[in-house]
Amino acid sequence: AAPAREQFSGQYGFLMSAIGSAVGLGNIWRFPGVAYTNGGGAFLIPYLVALLTAGIPILMLDYALGHRYRGSAPAVFRRLGKKFEFVGWLQVAVCVVIMSYYVVVLAWAASYVGFSTTVAWGDDPAGFFTGEYLNVSDPAFTLQLDWAVFWPVVVLWVLVFAVMAGRVSRGLELVNKFAIPALLLMFLTLVVRALFLPGALEGLNAFFTPDWAALANPAVWVAAYTQIFFSLSVAFGIMLTYSSYLKARSNMVPTGLVAAFANSSFELLAGFGVFATLGYMAHTQGVAVADLDSIAGVTLSFITFPQVIGTMPGGPLFGIMFFGSLLLAGFTSLVSILEVIVAAVREKFALSRPAAVGLVIGAGAIGSVVLFSTTNGLNALDIVDAFANNIGILTGAVLECIVVVFLARKLRELQLHLNQVSTLRLGDWWRWAVGILNPIVLLYVLVVTVFRYATVGYDPASYPASFNALFGWGTVVFILAVAAVATAMTWRTPVDRFTPV
Ligand code: PHE
Ligand code: NA
């Protein structure tokens, strides 16, 4: 028999968990760099457009689906129509890929909390990160383990198990209730400190100076949509799974808006903090911010920041707080990714929660160790991240819209459902956004990306075509294969005996 559905203890726990999922590594190491390289201040326009026309409407769609059809992603899509189960598993499979490298970045952050105390990288943070710590080799497939990464990865998986094996309300809800306020406090302190560094203002100027010409570049719009999807954690099955744990009458529309704006505010805050710090760095080196070489992604957090930490007064404390923030923000996101998979596996195979958690973590642990804790982890991770996000999530999002709108024709029903349980009503614009605008825009973004990866490749300057094929297209094949196999297996719970709430 199906286990009774678990529940959040209340709206506040749900909100903290929704924010915990949304606010993650993407806010801190992705957003500032993406914004800077895509028009600076001008990027805020495509970003806001993507947030309002795609991010928030699809967030609401996720909520409505999970809450009305009360299940994991595969169960919900199956309840929309038997042949749509595959779409749910597709979203689950994307989560499988993401969890296995996301945990590795968290492991790096954990290590760097420790390294900060003694400024272990000395005056060569770049050499330390890729050499001494990661032992990065030339792009190729290696099975050479890096023990310095392996151990923190193992510790993190154990911690995640401890949190996830307990019921939702005692496990992930409780962690989020403490972690999110703590994160906010720590990160605010960090940003305020950064704003008082000499040169901070020049950093902010560099960040916000608008390059209006960027608005005419389709790549900038593509970047904005991708950032919004990843950052809000929509169309991954996450918000769908979380909202399936809400009580039957829950006020979802305003809660969703609060979560979305909290995430964007955190992102902007990170932009301030990061660029104030970069301004300080440029100032001490006597160069312009634009001439600093690594402003984006992994290098920003693990090379550029350590450099600053080494030179500023109170650096070690600053470092502990910076990497501590990464760790907290990322941990609560990791838990949410895992819950998507756990819920799906549990429902399909009628497993207890600890059994499902053990199974999923076992699989995730193998992937994260074999592929990403090796001397090629950094390179592999970069490519897998690009393909999983830019192709995987977008495909999930496009299919979600198409199934709901055109195949199952549930859009109107879901709008009524949301409006029935919420104090704020969704207008008809929502149906236009989800039904017309999004399928067109997302399909366009997806096609452009697939075409670019298939012809030019992802970052051909850094990776040979064979490496791109192995890790990039390999990821796509893996996602499709996992989804197909899981769909073909037999349900052990009575998934089809169900009437919408
Ligand atoms: N939204 C998270 C972030 O900004 C990332 C994430 C992606 C979390 C997918 C869960 C699932 O970092
Ligand atoms: Na985010």
Image (spheres, rainbow, N blue to C red):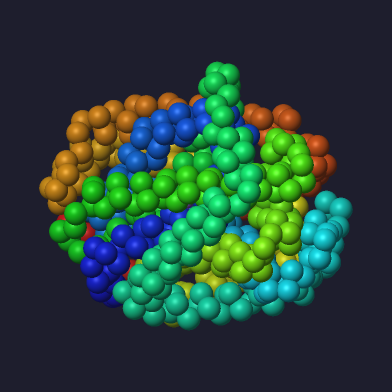
For the residue pair 429 and 31, the one nearer the viewer reads as: 31
Asked if 91 appears above or below 159 in the picture, the reply is: above
Q: How many marks?
A: 0
Which part of the image, by quadrant, shows the C terminus? bottom left
Identify which residue is drawn at 34% across, 27% down. Answer: 436
Identify which residue is drawn at 58% across, 74% down. Answer: 156
- Residue 14 can be seen in this image: yes
Identify which residue is drawn at 70% across, 56% down. Answer: 308
List x then y, in percent, for residue 500: 19, 54
For the residue pair 114 and 413, the one nearer the viewer reads as: 114
List x then y, in percent, for residue 181: 39, 66
The quadrant holding residue 314 is bottom right
148 with respect to 258 (left or right): right
Asked if 121 appears above or below 95 in the picture, the reply is: below
Which part of the image, by quadrant, shows the N terminus? bottom left
For the residue pair 85 and 218, the one nearer the viewer reads as: 218
- Residue 488 can be seen in this image: no
For the residue pair 479 and 245, the one nearer the viewer reads as: 245
List x then y, in percent, for residue 104: 64, 64
Asked if 160 appears above or below 136 in the picture, the reply is: below
Identify which residue is drawn at 48% across, 81% down. Answer: 162
Asked if 436 appears above or below 264 in the picture, the reply is: above
